[in-house]
Image: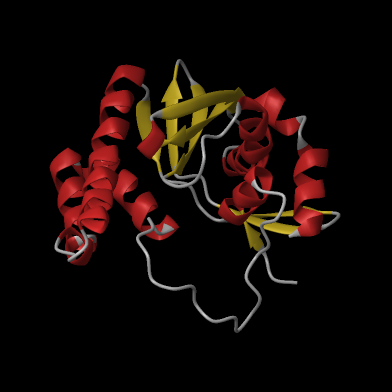
Amino acid sequence: MPDVTATELSKGVRSSTYRTPEAGAPEAPAFLVMPTTVGRKAVQTYHAEGAAPARAYLNEKFQTWLSHTSKSMRGNATNTIKALDTYIDADVVDGRAFVGPGVKVVLRLPSGTIATKVDVVTTQQKELSGRAVFWDGQPITLDEAQVIAYPYAVALQRMYPNETVADICVWQVRRDNLHVVTASEALARAGDANAVLARL
């Protein structure tokens, strides 16, 4: 069984009917989504280079949608780009210092493996915080956020084994929804994460 990504696990946490796509399955009909790789790069570009380059990157990626014949599609694209500003504003208020992007860490659980990459690592008062940034789906509840945060907390601990990991911030930028999950809360949900993984 191939690795399930932490993003796919998050979808399984939010929907009991979600299943990972089978190998060779046809692509879904085209519609506006924020690919994980695009969203992650936009956020990382902001932290590394500033707001203007991040906005320019998103505008380039969404150029087709911004000029779409459908008013709804154009509006959706515009709102997605505006969501980056929501993240930037929230980051300024948060005030934590940027450490760097995460690296891929593969977690092994009884039901399979989870490929996890923390979107952003920040620090405050010598404690690390990881961010898992989402652009899609219905609002994430605190209970769901704790399960979603589990692989990110483990990944961050493995990245920085000699540092203190304080929490994982689960951000939904289009909904301006943020849950700060302590590392202990996240790690306590290993069994729930494994149960979700088992049905994916």
Q: Position of residue 32 (x, y in %)?
A: 35, 60
Q: Position of residue 124 (x, y in %)?
A: 43, 19
The quarter of the picture where residue 67 lies is bottom left
Q: Is residue 40 left or right of residue 191?
A: left
Residue 139 vs residue 88, the one in the foreground: 139
Q: Is residue 47 above or below residue 59?
A: above
Residue 123 appears in the picture as rendered: yes
Q: Is residue 187 above or below residue 101?
A: above
Q: Residue at point 65% right, 65% down?
A: 20
Residue with the most extreme top position: 125
Q: Residue at point 27% right, 40% down?
A: 84
In which quadrant is the C terminus drawn?
Answer: bottom right
Residue with the most extreme right position: 110
Residue with the most extreme bottom position: 24
Q: Is residue 38 left or right of residue 147?
A: left
Q: Residue at point 23% right, 60% down?
A: 62
Residue 35 vs residue 32, the one in the foreground: 32
Q: How many marks?
A: 0
Q: Is residue 24 above or below residue 31?
A: below
Q: Position of residue 185 (x, y in %)?
A: 70, 24
Q: Is residue 138 left or right of residue 72?
A: right
In which quadrant is the N terminus drawn?
Answer: bottom right
Q: Residue at point 76% right, 49% down?
A: 196
Residue 93 vs residue 49, the one in the foreground: 93
Question: Which colouring convention does the figure follow?
Answer: secondary structure
Residue 161 appears in the picture as rendered: no
Residue 53 vs residue 136, the one in the foreground: 136
Q: Position of residue 158 (x, y in %)?
A: 64, 43
